[in-house]
Structure formats: C-alpha cells, structure tokens
Image: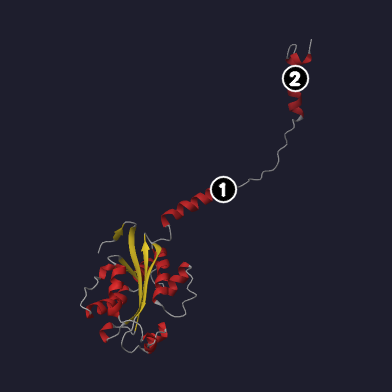
Amino acid sequence: MSDSYGAQGLREIVLDTETTGLDPRHGHRIVEIGCLELVNHIPTDRHFHRYINPECDISDEAVAVHGLTRERLSKEPVFAAIAGDFLDFIGDAKLVIHNADFDVGFLNAELAALGLPQMPPDRATCTVKMARRRFPGAPANLDALCRRFGVDNSGRALHGALLDAQLLAECYVELLGGRQHGLALAVETAAASVAIAGVVIQRTPRAHGPNESEIAAHAAMIASLKAPLWLGS
C-alpha cells in the first residue's frame, strides 16, 4: 500500500492493541485499541481510544500484562459497535505498529467476523523489524527502545494501548533518525560555529617599546635628513 498523503502531508497512525490472549485462532479477542495520528512524523492532537467487551474470558497472563479483567470490561461496547468509528479514524493511512503481525492478526480476525475487508500485511510498518535492522542483536521491545532513546516510560506500570501508542510514536521518530533529523545536523553545526567564533584566544603580551639598536637606527635616519621641518629654521 502506498503512503497516504493528505492536504497537510504524510499521514500515519501509530496503533496498539491489548488482547485476551496471544492467538486469535484460539478465540482470543481485542480488549483495547489505542491510535495516535502523525502528520509528517509529528503527533497531532487527534487520537482514538476504546476499551472493548470481548464477551469471553481473559487469561491470567493477559490480565497480568494490561490489568483489564472481564468484569472491568463487561459494560464496554463490543468490537462491532466501535468498528465503524475505528475504520473512519484510520482511513487509508499507513499504520505504525510494534510487532505488527500480532496486532494486524487480531484486527483482521475481528474484521473477518463482521464480514469486513481485512488489512493487507504491507499496510503496517513494524517497528520491531525496524529496531532489529538498526540494532542487530539488541533487545527490541518497547521498554528497551524507550531506554535507548531516552523516552520517559516511567508511567508504564502496566501495558495500555493509548499509552503504548504514545511511547511508540516517540520511538518511531527516533528509529527514523530522530526528530527533525534533517535539520539536526545543521543546527548542531551552526551552534558549533557560534561557539568557535566566540572563543577568546589568550596570548602572552608582547613588548612594544623599541630596543637600543632600533633607537640608534632611528637617530641615524633623522641625522641624515636635511633641514627637517619639525626642527624649524
């Protein structure tokens, strides 16, 4: 799928989900969706966030990750009730997802159950794959990327779809080369130039008075002049 350009430029959606388990083929469902809009790699004020009633049990392992219990979600809307708003929000934008195969697999299972078109695999940019290409052999989970790039994740006691999307948006920009990466070098170079221009170089003071030989040479030159004006008539 080609990149989505609107009137304001490149539009991307950073997306994260929380689920009842690890595999939609085993009946596991989505319990939370968080999305954050980027335009030209910069977050806007637009986001989409919903908790979802999965209408099924949630594994203890999943609850330990995100803290969402079946009781807590029992009064939330089901996926069918939020699907239209979700699809309207993402539109045809490229998706940015950490471990995209996982989230796209769950989204497609939910869409298929409603008879809706599924998302092609190439719609999503996978930041796990980006991180592994850039830092081979290094941990590629979201916490590790936050540590690497100095992104504050101190509020991430539990996983949350919108919080994780916000953290991922910051890490994604760093994986691309850093915020305003095209401008950064120019700014640093300019700052370095200003610093160099402002340096005051200290030198040992040099004596400026004439020495004896210079005084004698000057006197000899004056003596050779015929009727110099400053001596009068």
Q: Which one is earlier in the sequence, the residue at label 2 or at label 1?
A: 1
The alpha-carbon separation of the residues under discs 2 and 1 comes to 47 Å
| SS category of the residue bearing label 1 | helix
Q: Amino acid at mark 1?
A: Ile
How many labels, in total? 2
Q: Is residue 22 left or right of residue 177?
A: left
| Left or right, residue 177 beside residue 199 | left
Q: Position of residue 228 (x, y in %)?
A: 74, 14
Disc 2 crowd rating (10 Å Cα; few below 14, some 14-19, many 20+) is few
* Badge 1 density bin: few <14, some 14–19, many ≥20, Cα 10 Å: few
State whether residue 194 appears in this view.
Answer: yes
- Residue 24: x, y in percent? 28, 83
Instruction: State the residue in front, 226 or 211.
Output: 226
Q: Which mark is residue 112?
A: none
Q: Residue furthest top?
A: 233
Residue 57: x and y in percent read 33, 89
Quarter of the image containing the N terminus?
bottom left
Give the residue at mark 2.
220
Q: Secondary structure at mark 2?
A: helix
Residue at 31% from the left image edge and 68% from the top image edge: 89
Q: Quadrant of residue 74?
A: bottom left
> Residue under circle 1?
196
- Between tags 2 and 1, which lies in front? 1
Is residue 139 something that shows in the picture?
no
Q: Residue at x 57, y 45 (%)?
A: 197
Type of amino acid under label 2: Ala
